[in-house]
Amino acid sequence: MWDPMREIIKGIQPPVWYSVLFAAGFIFGYQIMVYIFKKEGKNPLNVDTLSVHMILATIIGARLGHLIFYEPERFLADPLMFFRTWEGGLASHGAAICIPIALYLYSNYVVSTRKSIFPLKFTKKRRQGQSYLWIVDRIVITVALAGAFIRFGNFVNSEIIGKPTGSDYGVVFGRVAEERLEKAELGFESVEASKGESRENLEAGIVPVDLTIVFENRQISEEQASNIINTGVRRMLMSDPAITEHYSQPSGPLDFELSLVDRKMQAVVHTWGISRYPAQLYESATCVILFLILLGLWFKWKEKTPEGLFFGIFLIWIFGLRWFHETFKENQVAFEDSMTFNMGQLLSIPLVLIGVFLVIRVIILSKKAKD
């Protein structure tokens, strides 16, 4: 049973864990890049400019990537939805396209401000000792770490979920029902999901879950509370799409008990959850492993690192494994259901091929250098 609070302090929405974890990726990445710049004799002040490029490229690219790849018709009909980030929707493939472009601008242009209708001025000027591949090779170390934070944030948010495991091993995202029931105006003070006691076997992958519901109205009668549970709660457990994605309530009356706890009416509803693969954790873990591999290689070679090697390894690792991870994940949008391979897998192919090209290029150049 996975049942975290999205918010860090209960009852206070901002900041939420996902936002903090997203920001943590940039904060730790900034410190790592400062360290790398100092060790390789580069001006660490450049990391400030580099960070601005990275943050803008990540957010803009990921948002555009989601809208273009997953919701093109809606985006064309309503381009302003780009700015409604609270509606959700970020795609790592979009960031993977936009970040290299931003890093090209960083390594080849200096940005200055001016008083005109276009306040930013780009002047072509290569940064001394910071070639394009040099900077990309080092930035992917921090991107791997940021990916680990972001995917763990998805896990906290109960989003980008895995497919049902078909066994009793997996994760039930219990917080979804809590949030939906608390916002349903049924008179609940709180709703808490927990692992239920086994009462009967339904089918593999459907596990018992208990929902503990506390009523706001201290004067509510047992009959009134029972009626709300049998009508409102039962209806939502069986028909609310957000809940039925994670819960599998059988038809028929609900199994529940009512009691008074601290002079408040409390109901414990015995229902069933769907055990799913923690696909977000799979991706987060592989990002951590990649981060450690790249950082270890950098400590070994530092300025002697073959240009393009880290970038190539990054693309092969992240998007090669992305193909594998997608087999454990639910499709993000309906049109993917009719596809042999989903959008995430198809978009990974060219990025893996670029990675293979970069690694082969390094091997060929290394052989020529030895001859």
Image: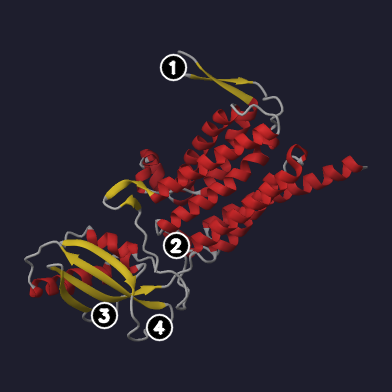
Mark 3 sits on what residue?
Answer: 251
Give the residue type at disc 4.
Answer: Glu
- Which residue is at the front of the view, 122 or 259? 259
Q: In the structure shown, which secondary structural element does the residue marked by tag 3 occupy?
A: loop
Q: Is residue 352 visible?
A: no
Q: Position of residue 177 (x, y in %)?
A: 30, 65
Label 4 vs 1, first from the N-terminus: 1
Mark 2 sits on what residue?
Answer: 161
| Tag 3 and tag 1, C-beta contact below 8 Å | no
| Tag 3 and tag 4, C-beta contact below 8 Å | no
Q: Position of residue 194 (x, y in %)?
A: 33, 70
Q: Residue at x 54, y 36 (%)?
A: 54
Question: Residue 203 shows which numbered tag?
Answer: 4
Mark 1 neighbour density, 10 Å: few (under 14) some (14–19) many (20 or more): few
Q: In the structure shown, which secondary structural element does the residue marked by tag 1 occupy?
A: loop
- Which residue is at the front of the view, 109 or 335? 109
In front: mark 3 or mark 4?
4
Label 3 vs 4, first from the N-terminus: 4
Label 3 vs 1, first from the N-terminus: 1
Mark 1 sits on what residue?
Answer: 117
Give the residue type at disc 3.
Answer: Ser
Give the residue type at disc 2.
Answer: Ile
Label 2 vs 3, first from the N-terminus: 2
Q: In the structure shown, which secondary structural element does the residue marked by tag 2 occupy?
A: loop
In front: mark 1 or mark 2?
2
Mark 1–mark 2 Cα distance, whole angstroms, equals 45 Å
In front: mark 2 or mark 3?
2
